[in-house]
C-alpha cells in the first residue's frame, strides 16, 4: 500500500535524526568558473577519505540521462534561456533522485561540485526571474554546508582564459550577443558573480576568499567542516526525501 | 509617383490548445480545430526531440521521475513556443497546440505533484483563448501508449506493474475532466 506524504515525511525524519546511525551529509562547493572549486573539492575529498568518510561526488550537468540531451543542444547553440534553465533543472533533479539522496540515505558524505545555486546565478544572469527558477528546483534539498568561493570577475576571467577559450554558453554569448568569447565571458561572469554574491548572503553560504593560497583555503574548509558537521538535520529537506521515498522503484532503503 | 494606400486585412492569429491522454485522438481533434483550408499549423509534443532521446537512453542511466519528465516537457514546450507557436502567431496564423499545458498539469497531479509547482513551471506559456479537451475513459485511457501521457506513465511506473500504470493514466484522464469542467 502507498504511504501518505505525511507518513513518508515521518520516515525521512526518523531516518535522518536517528542518533544510532551516522547520518549522510551534503556539502556543496559553489562559485564562478576559475574560482578553484574543483581543486579544493579534490583536496577535501582526499582528506575526508583519510578521516574514514565514505564520499560520493556529484558534478553539475552530469546526469547520465540528461547530460547527452543538453550536450547535443549546446553543440548547435540551440537553447533559449528558458530551455537552458529547464534542462539543467531536469539534470539536477535526476541526480538528486539517482545519486544524492540514495547516498545520503546510506549515510555517505556527498560533495556537490556546484549545486542549485549555479543554476540560479546563471539563469538570473541570463535575465530569468529568480522566483521562477528557484521554484523549479523544488522540493528543495538544502546542503548541510555550502562553501562559496569568491573571486573577482577579473580573476575569474584571467584564470579561465589562461588555459582555454570559454565555450559559447559559458561565455554567455547567447545573451550578450558579443562575438568575442573572451569579451563576452568578462561581461557575463560579472553578472553571474553579482548574482552569486546576493545568493551567498540570502542563503547564508560560507564565503571562502578564493584569491588566497590553495593551502590556506583548504585549512579553512577543514576547520569549518569540523565545526559545521554536527549541525542537526534540516527539516526543510523532509519534502524532498519523502517524494523520493514515495517514487515507484526508487531503490532500497524503504 | 502616386502613393497608394492599400488596406491589408490582418488575419486573426489564434492559439487553440487540445489536451488529452491519447496522442492519436489529440491529433484528430487538432485537425478538426484547425479546420480545412486554414493557413495555420499544429504544434505537437516532442518537436524538440528531447523525449525521443530519452526513449533510447541506456537503462543504467535510471528512469526519470514525474518531476524530471515535467521539467523536460516544459523545456520541449519552450522550444515549441519559440520555433512553432510564437512565429506562427506573429504571422497572423492560427496554431493548434496538441498537447499543451493542461495535459502536463493533469499528469503531474495524477503523479502526486503539488499544483503550485506545476503552475509556476508553466508560467512562461501564454494562455490560450480556446482550450479543447479529448476525454478517454476506463480501458481506452489505459491503452494510451503514444504521446506524453503514455510515455510518462511507462517511465514512472516501470517495474511497478500494469495496475500502477493503469491507475496513473486513469487519474490523468480524471484530472483532465476536472480541468475541462473548470474551463
Image (spheres, rainbow, N blue to C red):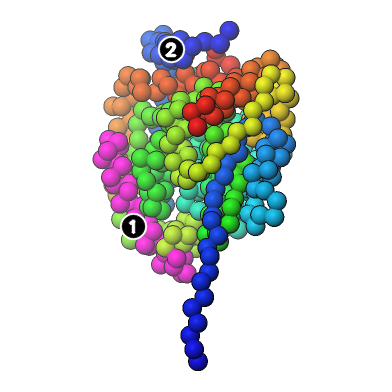
Apparent side of residue A31 relative to residue B45 in the rendered image (left or right): left
Quick one: label 2 or label 1, which is nearer the N terminus? 2
Q: Is residue A25 magenta?
A: no
Residue B28 vertical position relative to residue B85 in the rendered view, above or below: above
Residue B156 vertical position relative to residue A200 in the rendered view, above or below: above
Magenta stretch: give its range.
Answer: A177-205
Question: On what subunit does the disc labeled 2 rest?
Answer: A
Q: Nearer the viewer, residue A135 or A249?
A: A135
Does residue B14 appear in this view?
yes
The residue that appears at 46% across and 21% down in the rendered structure is: A241
Quadrant housing residue B142:
top right
Q: Which residue is mark 1?
A: A190
The nearer-to-camera label among 2 and 1 is: 2
Badge 2 vs badge 1, beta-carbon distance below 8 Å: no
Q: Nearer the viewer, residue A230 or B155?
A: B155
Q: Which residue is mark 2?
A: A6
Q: Mark 1: give few (<14), some (14-19) or many (20+) Cα within 10 Å.
A: some
The residue that appears at 32% across and 48% down in the rendered structure is: A195
Q: Residue furthest left?
A: A201
Q: Secondary structure at mark 1?
A: helix
The residue that appears at 35% across and 31% down in the rendered structure is: A145
Apparent side of residue A93 relative to residue B32 in the rendered image (left or right): left
Amino acid at each position: 500500500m502507498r504511504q501518505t506524504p505525511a507518513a513518508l515525511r515521518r520516515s525521512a525524519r526518523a531516518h535522518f535524526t536517528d542518533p544510532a546511525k551516522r547520518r549522510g551529509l551534503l556539502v556543496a562547493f559553489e562559485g564562478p568558473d576559475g574560482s578553484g572549486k574543483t581543486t579544493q573539492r579534490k583536496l577535501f575529498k582526499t582528506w575526508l577519505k583519510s578521516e574514514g568518510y565514505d564520499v560520493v561526488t556529484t558534478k553539475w550537468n552530469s546526469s547520465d540521462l540528461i547530460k547527452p540531451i543538453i550536450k547535443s543542444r549546446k553543440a548547435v547553440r540551440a537553447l533559449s534561456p528558458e530551455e537552458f534553465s529547464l534542462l539543467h533543472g531536469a539534470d539536477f533533479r535526476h541526480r538528486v533522485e539517482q545519486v544524492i539522496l540514495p547516498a545520503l540515505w546510506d549515510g555517505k558524505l556527498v560533495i556537490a561540485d556546484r549545486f542549485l545555486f549555479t543554476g540560479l546565478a546563471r539563469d538570473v544572469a541570463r535575465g530569468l526571474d529568480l522566483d521562477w527558477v528557484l521554484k523549479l528546483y523544488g522540493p528543495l534539498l538544502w546542503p548541510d554546508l555550502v562553501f562559496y568561493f569568491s573571486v573577482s570577475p577579473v580573476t575569474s576571467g584571467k584564470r579561465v582564459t589562461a588555459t582555454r577559450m570559454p565555450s559559447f554558453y559559458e561565455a554567455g554569448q547567447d545573451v550578450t550577443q558579443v562575438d568575442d568569447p573572451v569579451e563576452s565571458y568578462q561581461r557575463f561572469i560579472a553578472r553571474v558573480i553579482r548574482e552569486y554574491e546576493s545568493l551567498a548572503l540570502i542563503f547564508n553560504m560560507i564565503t571562502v576568499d578564493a584569491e588566497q593560497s590553495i593551502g590556506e583555503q583548504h585549512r579553512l574548509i577543514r576547520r569549518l567542516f569540523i565545526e559545521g558537521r554536527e549541525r542537526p538535520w534540516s527539516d526543510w529537506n523532509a519534502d524532498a526525501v519523502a517524494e523520493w521515498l514515495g517514487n515507484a522503484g526508487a531503490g532500497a532503503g524503504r | 509617383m502616386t502613393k497608394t494606400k492599400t488596406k491589408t486585412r490582418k488575419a486573426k492569429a489564434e492559439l487553440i490548445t487540445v489536451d488529452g491522454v491519447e496522442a492519436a485522438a489529440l491529433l484528430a481533434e487538432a485537425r478538426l480545430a484547425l479546420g480545412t483550408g486554414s493557413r495555420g499549423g499544429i504544434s505537437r509534443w516532442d518537436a524538440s526531440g528531447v523525449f525521443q532521446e530519452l526513449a533510447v537512453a541506456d537503462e543504467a542511466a535510471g528512469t526519470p521521475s514525474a518531476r524530471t519528465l515535467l521539467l523536460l516537457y516544459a523545456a520541449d514546450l519552450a522550444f515549441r513556443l519559440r520555433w512553432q507557436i510564437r512565429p506562427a502567431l506573429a504571422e497572423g496564423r492560427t496554431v493548434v497546440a496538441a498537447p499543451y499545458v493542461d495535459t502536463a498539469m493533469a499528469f503531474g497531479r495524477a503523479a502526486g505533484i503539488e499544483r503550485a509547482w506545476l503552475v509556476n513551471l508553466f508560467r512562461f506559456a501564454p494562455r490560450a483563448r480556446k482550450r479543447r479537451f479529448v476525454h478517454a475513459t476506463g480501458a481506452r485511457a489505459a491503452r494510451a501508449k503514444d504521446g506524453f501521457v503514455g510515455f510518462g506513465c511507462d517511465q514512472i511506473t516501470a517495474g511497478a506493474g500494469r495496475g500502477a500504470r493503469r491507475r496513473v493514466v486513469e487519474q490523468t484522464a480524471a484530472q483532465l475532466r476536472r480541468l475541462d469542467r473548470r474551463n
